[in-house]
Image (cartoon, rainbow, N blue to C red):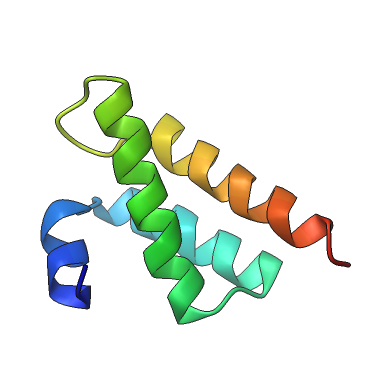
């Protein structure tokens, strides 16, 4: 997926954007991780049968990313 496709298919509202930004700062994640988190959140939303990414989907995706990073530090 290109960045434009991610923005189109994995759109989040302003409140979720703030939440993701805070997670990015606290976990010291890159822009690439931002896109990956959005794609995983979209997949979680799809599996849940949701038409849009919601807070639980985004939080689960962030949790997976933070677990991945904890294994290497």
Residue 41, image x and y in percent?
38, 44
* Closer-to-camera residue (22/11): 11
What residue do we see at 14% from left, 30% from top? Answer: 51
What residue do we see at 21% from left, 64% from top? Answer: 6
Residue 48 in which image quadrant: top left
Quarter of the figure that contains the N terminus: bottom left
Q: How many marks?
A: 0
72 over 46 or under it: above or below: below
Residue 70, image x and y in percent?
81, 57
What residue do we see at 19% from left, 36% from top? Answer: 52
61 over 26 or under it: above or below: above
Quarter of the figure that contains the C terminus: bottom right
46 over 23 or under it: above or below: above
What residue do we see at 50% from left, 69% from top? Answer: 33
Q: Residue at the bottom extreme?
A: 31
* Closer-to-camera residue (22/71): 71
Residue 49 in which image quadrant: top left
């Amino acid at each position: 997926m290109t960045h434009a496709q991610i923005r189109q298919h994995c759109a989040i509202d302003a409140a979720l954007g703030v939440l993701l930004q805070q997670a990015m700062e606290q976990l010291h994640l890159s822009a690439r991780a931002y896109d990956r988190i959005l794609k995983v959140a979209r997949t979680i939303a799809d599996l849940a049968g949701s038409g849009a990414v919601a807070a639980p989907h985004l939080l689960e995706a962030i949790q997976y990313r933070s677990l991945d990073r904890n294994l290497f530090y």
